[in-house]
Amino acid sequence: MKWEEFVGWIFRGGLRRGTPSAAAAAPKLTRGGADFIAGQVARTTFRIFKNNLLALPWIKDGEELSAALDGARADLLRARHAYRESIKSRRAAARAEADWRRATDEFRRQVAGLNRRLAAYNLKAPSNAFRKLPVDADREISRVLHDE
């Protein structure tokens, strides 16, 4: 006799005797169907990643996007500081303006690329709580200008 048959025999015997605790102890084989199985698969996958110190791919993508955005902001801030230092001398003022224009154009290109990557990331993120808003390059530039 297999153990499944043995357990079933015990539960059937308990039900014949009329004990309600035996009926409550009977295993429930169907617990929500496909949704329950999908949840179990997601939890198991997350547990495997977590136990092996691996991050889920969309989490890693989000961290890379945040780091890239921080790097682009730092480059813009660095260019602004260089512009302020260069504008002090009259000979370097024209060159400083051209450098600042080039830095803002490069920042806008970087933000456009980041926004494309953010759109792809938002499709991978499992819920709205993890999604990221697109970055407005002009607002970031004006924030750097007003923080002076």
Image (spheres, rainbow, N blue to C red):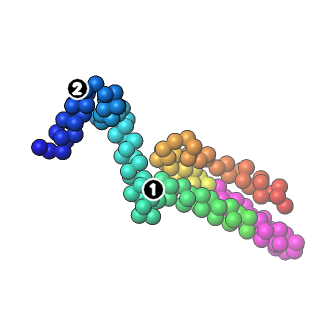
Amino acid, disc 1: Leu
Location of residue 19 in the rendering, given as x and y in whole percent from the top left corner: 31, 28
Q: Which mark is residue 48?
A: none
Please say whether residue 110 is visible from this viewpoint.
no
Reply above or below: 75 against 37. Answer: below
Determine the residue positioned at 68% across, 66% down. Answer: 75
Reply above or below: 93 against 114. Answer: below
Image quadrant holding the C terminus, namely bottom right
Bounds of the magenta segment: 80-109
Q: Nearer the viewer, mark 2 or mark 1?
A: 2
Determine the residue positioned at 84% across, 74% down. Answer: 91
Q: Which mark is residue 56?
A: 1
Determine the residue positioned at 59% across, 61% down. Answer: 68
Reply above or below: 104 against 81. Answer: above
Please say whether residue 122 is visible from this viewpoint.
yes
Judge from the rendering whether residue 114 lies leftward or rightward of residue 103; answer left or right: left
